[in-house]
Amino acid sequence: MQLNCYLPTLSSIRAFGTPLVCAACGERLIAPTASAFVEGGEIRHTWECEDCGATSHSSISLEDGEPR
């Protein structure tokens, strides 16, 4: 039996959508502070910038998979 080891490189890691940036200061937002499933097939995320504290919201429709 042979053991194969695969070490991913940064270029091979898949990005899940376009990174969000803070509208107030331009810093990249890493993870939402809260997420909620809404009846009708939608997921809503609440984001808070770690640098300036500004909050924003985004939503994803489960039917078409496109962020809004």
Image (cartoon, grey):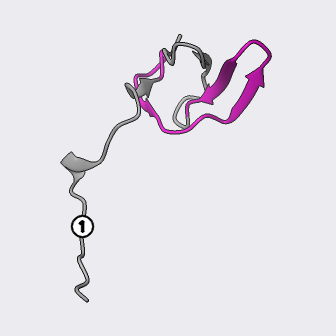
Coordinates of residue 18 in the picture (x, y in percent): 37, 25
Q: In this view, does 55 lie above or below 3?
A: above
Q: In this view, does 38 lie above or below 4?
A: above
Q: In which quarter of the image is residue 38?
A: top right
Badge 1 crowding class, 10 Å Cα cut-off, few under 14, some 14 to 19, many 20 or more, is few
Helix, strand or loop at disc 1?
Answer: loop
Residue 16, how many percent across, how many down? 41, 34
Residue in the picture at 43% in, 24% down: 21
Front position in the image: 42 or 52: 42
The residue at 19%/46% (across/down) is 11
Q: Which residue lies furthest to the front in this view?
A: 1
The three-letter amino acid code for the residue at tag 1 is Leu
For label 1, the residue is 7
Q: In which quarter of the image is the N terminus?
A: bottom left
Between residue 38 and residue 56, name the one nearer to us.
38
* Residue 52 picture location, percent across and down: 55, 29
Q: Which residue is drawn at 23% across and 77% down?
A: 4
Would residue 51 be found to the left or right of residue 3 on screen? right
Residue 37 appears left or right of 48: right
Q: In the visual, does 35 lie left or right of 56? A: right
Magenta segment: does it hold 11?
no
The residue at the far right in this view is 39
Residue 41 is covered by the magenta coloring: yes
Total marks shown come to 1
Magenta region: 22-49
